[in-house]
Every structure is written in C-alpha cells, then in structure tokens.
Image (cartoon, helix red, strand yellow):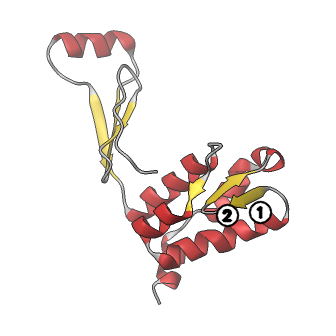
Amino acid sequence: EGEAYWGLGPSAHSFDGIRRRSWNRPNNQNYIKEIVKGHLPEEHEILSDIDLYNEMIMIGLRTSKGCNLRVLENKFGSQVCTYFQTQMNQAILAENAIQKEDHVFLSSKGRMMADAIMRDAFLTQEDLKLLNR
C-alpha cells in the first residue's frame, strides 16, 4: 500500500514511503567488504507518479489482500482510481478478478494470467495525459 519498508542484506530493496527506492548490491563478498568499511553498498532511484501507481498495482495484485481502492484514490485521485476499476472490470467479467468492498484481487484463475492482467491495469504516460484532459 505504498508504505515504507527497509530491506537488509545483499540484493535487499527498501522504500522510504514517498518516492525513493534503494537496493543493496547483490554480491555477498563486496557487500560485506563495504559494510566493514562503514559504507552501505546501495543504489537508488526516485519514482515518478506512474512508477508508484504501477508498483502499487503490481504488488497489490500479487497478494491475497489485493488493491485497496480507497488507498488508490487517496494517493492518485479519482480519475486514476476509475481507470484502474475500468481496466479491472474486464478481468472481473472474465472471472480473473474479484471485487469485495474496496478491494480488488485476482481469482485463482486470474493468478495464472497475473502478468497480463497487471499490464492491462498499468498506466503509461499517454494514459495519464488522456486522464488529465
């Protein structure tokens, strides 16, 4: 749901809950050498609104809890939430997704096609331009 988390160890990822995602380098020996020197061997990136939305969709749909429509609307606005619901309505009609109250999640059948369903719900820069007209 876009909350902060901290990953420890080689290859672990962290997120500040706002826009900064970081990850530790994967090589165990180099990781330990850097830690011993007092350096955190990490790289980072700053996520755009589209990145944050797409990541929330990707992670949410991979959980049994699903995507929380209230959280989507609070973070990204009603137009983006409506876009998500419209995209997911096709999956719901095909019995690949289920909506219960404010949560949309994949059905057992839908989990087999998760990547395609997520791809359809993702936003692109072009989609965002159309929504903001």
Position of residue 39 measured from the top left corner of the image (x, y, whole percent): 17, 21
- Taking 42 as reference, is 59 left or right? right
Position of residue 73 measured from the top left corner of the image (x, y, whole percent): 47, 69
Q: Which mark is residue 91?
A: 1
Q: Which mark is residue 117?
A: none
Q: Which mark is residue 120?
A: 2
Identify the element where label 2 is drawn: helix
Q: Outermost residue toward the bottom?
A: 133
Of 92 and 129, the residue lying toward us: 92
Q: Outermost residue toward the left?
A: 38
Q: From what the image shows, is residue 9 above or below residue 47?
A: above
For marks 2 and 1, give the CA distance: 9 Å
Identity of the amino acid at label 2? Asp
Q: From what the image shows, is residue 100 above or below residue 65?
A: below
Other-residue count near label 2 (Cα within 10 Å), few / some / many at <14 / 14–19 / ≥20: some
Labels 2 and 1 touching (C-beta < 8 A)? yes
- Taking 39 as reference, is 50 left or right? right
Q: From what the image shows, is residue 53 above or below residue 41?
A: below
Identify the element where label 1 is drawn: helix
Give the residue at x 30% y 53%: 18
Identity of the amino acid at label 1? Ala
